[in-house]
Amino acid sequence: MATRMDLDGRPIKPMTICMIGAGGFIGSHLCEKLMADTPHKVLALDVYSDKIKHLLEPDSLPWAGRIVFHRLNIKHDSRLEGLIKMADLTINLAAICTPADYNTRPLDTIYSNFIDALPVVKYFSENNKRLIHFSTCEVYGKTIGSFLPKDSPLRKDPAYYVLKEDTSPCIFGSIEKQRWSYACAKQLIERLIYAEGAENGLDFTIVRPFNWIGPRMDFIPGIDGPSEGVPRVLACFSNENPDRANGHIFNVGNPNNEVTVRQLAEMMTKVYAKVSGEPSLESPTIDVSSKEFYGEGYDDSDKRIPDMTIINRQLGRSCFFDCSQDLLFMVHMRTTYAEAIKKSMVKPIAS
Ligand code: NAD
């Protein structure tokens, strides 16, 4: 493998990465990328390994030995500190991050996104390691624009809704709108990590994904996920340029991908028809209120448009998919779920 260079033209030394939540959607893709394109070693931590099974065996894989899975729950496992100590860099992806849980399981959401992440921050700080922590665009909450009168011309001014890492405020709904429990927990852990950087000089980067989509991101209840669960509506950043990334918080999204949930559903049904060759549905969407869908305590967010100035300045032009790339995603959905769809279509209907 040719030596990789960072954005400043310096060779990148192979390192050991402790990836917490490596078995999830983003983690599994990141592991694939690290194995295929870099010489780095990965200590992959998660309670599940299904999504990275293809990277762990057989032993004849070209990267055999470079990725080692450790099944553990960071809530209570004494191996965590040792694994963070062994690594040059820790990437923390572990979280409950399914919107349907924010208002229905607020305690688990707060514990998972704040309390459970505390030991990770503690060990990174005590051992003077580098941390990349995955936060969320949800920390911005509502935009200032959403408080303007409906007919105000200012609503069209990007200054009122484009979200900038270093200047936009974080505006959440009232406490009984428990949907904000996730955003608030994520915000507090961000502030803690930022304070570790400011007071103790620790190296960190915070990433705020803006609704990334792709294969392995979600599940269909009862088919490849819990039958009771509500799935989510639906990587490319550098971890090899620490000098340019340290101390920064990055929006990671595509400002041109702004679609409403209705548009997203329509786009998906259109693309699905194209990929499957089946005719488009006559009425592809029905209106369901967010309260009906998510339950009591839900609160809608308005526009979420990332300002990309900081990431473009620090890491060069960003390369994020646009919505049309979801074609690939639909191909995956089709192959993953074709059999399940067929089966559910031939099920007898109860009279
Ligand atoms: P995911 O749910 O697919 O992955 C999270 C992984 O963490 C899961 O495999 C889970 O088993 C693991 N995990 C959770 N708690 C754990 C624990 N206590 N011990 C060990 N492992 C644990 O989520 P994802 O989409 O890959 O998201 C990763 C991170 O990015 C999360 O922090 C999430 O908040 C953030 N994020 C993602 C998006 C997105 O668009 N996917 C958007 C905003 C924020």
Image: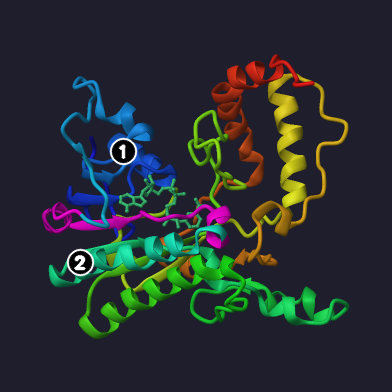
For residue 84: magenta? Answer: yes
Mark 2 Cβ and ligand 1 under 8 Å apart: no
Q: Nearer the viewer, mark 2 or mark 1?
A: 2
Q: Residue at x 21, y 81 (%)?
A: 200
The one nearer the camera, 351 or 312, is 351
User: Is 318 placed above or below 280 here?
Assistant: below
**Left of 193 or right of it: where is 329?**
right
Tell me where residue 73 appears, x and y as whole percent: 27, 50
Which quadrant would residue 327 be assigned to in this image? Answer: top right
Residue sitting at the far front: 351
| Magenta segment boundaries in residue numbering | 77-103
Mark 1 Cβ and ligand 1 under 8 Å apart: no
**Left of 340 or right of it: where is 260?**
right
Which quadrant would residue 240 be assigned to in this image? Answer: bottom left
The one nearer the camera, 73 or 149, is 73
- Disc 2 crowd rating (10 Å Cα; few below 14, some 14-19, many 20+) is many
Tell me where residue 279 appears, x and y as whole percent: 81, 22
Residue sitting at the far bottom: 199
Q: Which residue is mark 1?
A: 37
Residue 315, numbered circle:
none
The one nearer the camera, 108 or 3, is 108
User: Is 266 placed above or below 9 here?
Assistant: above
Residue type, label 2: Phe
**Left of 231 or right of it: where is 59?**
left
Q: Residue at x 75, y 77 (%)?
A: 157
The one nearer the camera, 42 or 6, is 42
Residue type, label 1: Asp
Q: Which residue is mark 2?
A: 124
The number of discs equals 2
CB-based contact (under 8 Å), mark 2 and mark 1? no
